Amino acid sequence: VTDKVLGWIVAFATLGIQIGLLFVFVVASEANLQDDAIDIQFTWKCPRDTYACENTAGLTDAGWAIFSVLMVAFLSKDMINGSKLINHSVRITHSFQSRIRYFFGGLCLCWFTLFALYVSTV
């Protein structure tokens, strides 16, 4: 977190581009089932002669466990660093402007990390 204007411009440009790219995936995940042009494959198979339906998606508990381990491994560093920046923002030893920058930078980093986790999950 710097007091240079160019550094903040680069940081906000990078954040904006990343949010824009992730937002494309969020919009694509919200399907309108009334639209005939969608490419959704329905994963539930319900035979007419039984009351039970089965999911044929192939998502297993082991797959979700591996996904969780990977998400924790790659996103925990950003979440920890964002939390540290927020923690530094409450220290009185820093100037008020530095504390505001630390808080805002940490909040943006934590928010973006949680947004990336959400996009990866949906």
Image: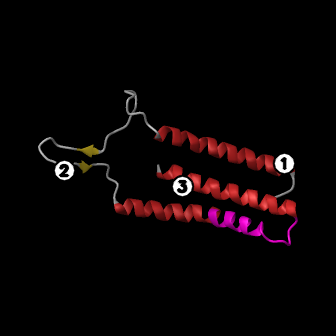
Local crowd size for mark 2, using a 10 Å CA cut-off: few (<14), some (14–19), many (≥20):
few
Q: CA distance from mark 1 to mark 2?
A: 60 Å
Q: Give the side of residue 91 with respect to residue 81, left or right.
A: right
- Quadrant location of residue 19? top right
Q: Position of residue 14 (x, y in %)?
A: 71, 47
Q: Position of residue 21 (x, y in %)?
A: 60, 42
**Residue drawn at (52%, 42%), measured in percent from left and top?**
25
Magenta segment boundaries in residue numbering: 79-95
Q: Name the element at disc 1.
A: helix
Residue named by callout 1: 6
Q: Say if mark 1 contacts mark 2, CB within 8 Å.
A: no
Q: Position of residue 30 (x, y in %)?
A: 46, 39
**Amino acid residing under circle 2:** Ala
The mark closer to the camera, 1 or 2, is 2
Residue named by callout 2: 52
The quarter of the rendered structure image containing the N terminus is bottom right
**Amino acid residing under circle 3:** Leu
Q: Name the element at disc 2.
A: loop
User: Quick one: label 2 or label 3, which is nearer the N terminus?
Assistant: 2
Residue named by callout 3: 117
Q: How is the image coloured?
A: secondary structure
